Image: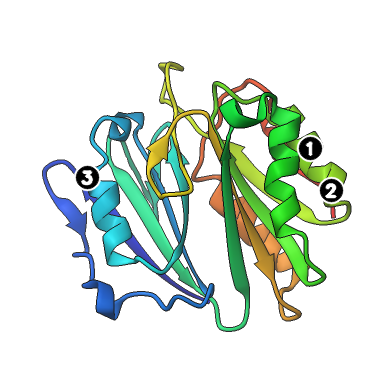
Amino acid sequence: MRIVTHHYGANTGWAPELPPPWAAAPGDGSTVLMVFGASAFLDDPAPLRALRAAYPDAVATGCSSAGEILGDDIHDGGLVAAVLTFEQTRVRRVARGIAELGDARALGRALAEPLIGDDLQGIFVLSDGLAINGTQLMTGLQGLLPGVIITGGLAGDDDRFQRTWVLNEAGEPESGTACALGFYGPRVHRVRLQRRLAHLRARAPHHPRGGQRGLRAGR
């Protein structure tokens, strides 16, 4: 797996500079784009759109956070992004809104069903941290995916707890949304995957509602 990281600040823009789309990720489901940042990007999604334009064929997910971690540095008010390219693992994505499903358990089932597959090895879930109950979301996911590693987090809003966002199906930041990535392939090492996804989960501080345990699953 290869990883490229970027950081966005209001005074610096994206660093390192975003690549032109033709030089970016392949569109075969082998590349994942993850981005975490301040809730204020609900009002100003232009940096997120620039990021998506640079990696148009990557499978994208992300959410608002309570501070952004990049290496040994912690940032506030910006964005951090990681682009992960796998050699043999393939990734699929589904995003749905709580408003269209009615409750978090139904939302979990709606996320899980399109991801069911014989070679599904693990799922990484990000969810709105205020409008969606993490425990019920997890119950819906586990009901259709017994034995599958599931990890993730609830979106944050620093210390305000007013609004959060998750990238929706169109790759735009939206409140009331949950997104799930499914990881597939016989070469996926389940224990390593669980550790890597747990490491990525640390980039997504969660709102206490539902509890972080609500988005953890056993093997």
Asked if the residue under mark 2 is in contact with the one under mark 1, i.e. CB atoms within 8 Å, the reply is yes
- SS at badge 2: helix
For the point 23% across and 48% down, which residue is it? 47
Residue 62 drawn at (x, y percent):
46, 47
Q: Alpha carbon of mark 1 to alpha carbon of mark 2: how far? A: 7 Å
Q: Earlier in the sequence, mark 2 or mark 3?
A: 3
Amino acid under disc 3: Ala
Count the numbered circles shown. 3
Amino acid under disc 2: Leu
Residue 162 drawn at (x, y percent):
42, 16
Amino acid under disc 1: Gly
Which of the 4 image quadrants contains residue 187?
bottom right
- SS at badge 3: helix
Comparing 156 with 109, the one in front is 109
Numbered badge on residue 46:
3
Numbered badge on residue 140:
1
Q: Alpha carbon of mark 2 to alpha carbon of mark 3: how far? A: 36 Å
Q: Which residue is mark 2?
A: 144
Q: Earlier in the sequence, mark 1 or mark 3?
A: 3
Horizontally, residue 140 falls left or right of residue 134, namely: right
For the point 22% across and 45% down, which residue is it? 46
Horizontally, residue 62 falls left or right of residue 87, namely: left
- SS at badge 1: helix
Question: Measured along the vertical axis of the image, is residue 103 above or below residue 193?
Answer: above
Specify few, some or many for label 2: CA neighbours under 10 Å numbering under 14, 14-19, or 20 or more: some
For the point 32% across and 75% down, which residue is it? 24
For the point 55% across and 53% down, which residue is it? 200
